[in-house]
Amino acid sequence: MINKSILFVVCLIFILLAILWIAYNNKALEINTIVVTSNRLPKKFDGFRIAQISDLHNAEFGNNNSQLISALENADADIIVITGDMVDSRRTKIDRAVHFADRAVKIAPTYYVNGNHESRIHDAEYKHLITRLEYAGVTVLENEVAEISMEDASITLVGLNDPRFQMELIDDTMERNIVRKQMGVVPKNDAYKVLLIHRPEYFDEYAGNVDLVFSGHAHGGQFILPFVGGVLAPGQGLFPQYCDGLYTQGTTNMIVSRGLGNSLFPFRINNRPEVIVAELNAES
């Protein structure tokens, strides 16, 4: 018979190791580079680097997000894109979000689109957040278009609101219709188009209309099982189709960030917070 004291020590060690593993999975930043190649990308943009921040949810990595800022500095990015949920509606800390943005814009031009959590906070809080982001130098895109130029070449950046800004209680069909309507702001021209939108689950609505999509929202499936993948994502349910990395449909690529923070579920498993760096390559 196993000595009870030995069994207790083994169980205690197992619990401590589990706690350390979970802590590591929630605080150890990972920088992942994804190469996207297209024959539609202007040659002047060959090697253009886009760093993506998503689903921060007011998390901190180091004092005043020093680790996150360091990761962005090391990314050597030409622009930074923030794809929603900078704040968390359950514990909104606008000062923390703005302080991060204020430091990010000093690294590279920074563009922001909102997420479902921004849609949940009070209107006055959201307006305050947007005002302060813009004052810090962030370009806020609310169903708007921005052009990024390099010498005589340019690409188009499109930023769409989260569909939840339309109303409080809507179902999936209504969300899809809102997204479809908002896609009408995408210019009908031959420019290489990059879409910033929080939700990956409507990929079929984006495909064919833009060249590259940056999204988040899925939190990497929250818990990643070996050989299976992500377990659960908002808007997609169990075993989500789009939760991590690069997806392709026709000529459109979509990058889904695992994000950085947590919300309803307070921890991740096998799912480290990440900063994505997309490197655009012009196909010769």
Image: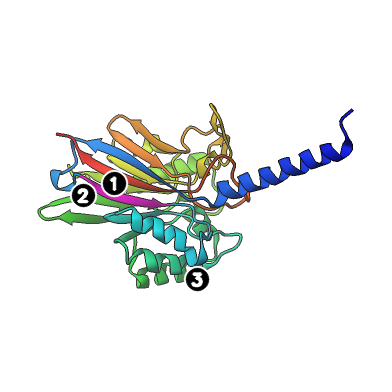
Residue under numbered circle 2: 155
Tag 1: amino acid: Val
Decide which of tag 3 and tag 2 comes sooner along the chain. Answer: 3
Q: Residue at x 33, y 53 (%)?
A: 75
The magenta span reads 47-53
Residue 151 in view here: yes
Mark 2 crowdedness (10 Å alpha carbons): few <14, some 14-19, many ≥20:
some
Q: Count of labels shown?
A: 3
Distance between mark 1 and mark 2 Cα atoms: 8 Å
Three-letter code, disc 2? Ile
- Residue in front for this viewpoint, 109 or 213: 109
Q: Are the two marked residues, 1 and 2, in contact with CB atoms closer than 8 angstroms?
A: yes
Q: Are marks 3 and 1 in contact (CB under 8 Å)?
A: no
- Residue at image mark 3: 95
Which residue shows up at 17% across the image and 55% down it?
A: 149
Name the mark nearer the viewer: 3 or 1. 3
Indicate the amino acid at tag 3. Answer: Asp
Residue 219 is a magenta residue:
no
Q: Which residue is mark 1?
A: 194
Q: Is residue 179 above or below residue 38?
A: below
Is 40 displayed left or right of 258 in the figure? left
The Cα atoms of the two marked residues, 3 and 1, are separated by 29 Å
Assign a secondary structure to mark 1.
Answer: strand
